[in-house]
Image (cartoon, grey):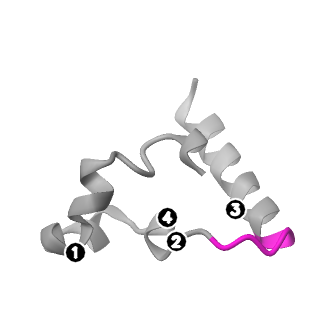
Amino acid sequence: MKRSEINTLIRDSLEFFEDCRFQLPLWATWKPEQWRGKKEEVGEIVENMLGWDLTDF
C-alpha cells in the first residue's frame, strides 16, 4: 500500500469520526516530535502498541 493511500485513509477516517462525534485520544494525531521526551507519560501506549495500525481505532 502506498503512503499516499494510507494518508488518504487516515484523513477520511478522521473526518468520519468527527462527523460521528467520535473522539479519539489526543495522542492519536500527535506528530513524532510530540512523542519525544514523554517516555513515562506514554509508556502504556507504547507497551500495548496502540495506534500503530489503522485498525487500532
Between marks 2 and 1, how big is the CA–CA gap? 14 Å
Residue 30 covered by magenta stretch: no
Between marks 1 and 3, how big is the CA–CA gap? 24 Å
Which residue is denoted by mark 3 in the rendering? 14
Mark 2 vs 1, N-terminal side:
2
Q: Amino acid at mark 2?
A: Pro
Foreground: disc 2 or disc 3: 2
Between marks 1 and 4, how big is the CA–CA gap? 14 Å
Residue situated in front as seen by the camera: 53 or 12: 53
Point out residue 45 in the picture as x, y percentages from the top left corner.
Answer: 32, 58
Mark 1 vs 4, N-terminal side:
4
Magenta segment boundaries in residue numbering: 18-23
Using a 10 Å C-alpha cutoff, classify the residue at mark 1 as few (fewer than 14 neighbours), some (14 to 19) or many (20 or more): few
Point out residue 17 in the picture as x, y percentages from the top left corner.
Answer: 76, 64
> At x 24% / y 50%, what residue is drawn?
47
Q: Amino acid at mark 1?
A: Glu
Cβ–Cβ below 8 Å for labels 2 and 3? no
Which residue is denoted by mark 1 in the rendering? 41
Using a 10 Å C-alpha cutoff, classify the residue at mark 4 as few (fewer than 14 neighbours), some (14 to 19) or many (20 or more): few
What label does residue 19 carry, if any? none
Left or right position of 35 against 4: left
Which residue is denoted by mark 4 in the rendering? 28
Between marks 3 and 4, how big is the CA–CA gap? 10 Å
Instruction: Say which quarter of the image contains residue 13.
Output: bottom right
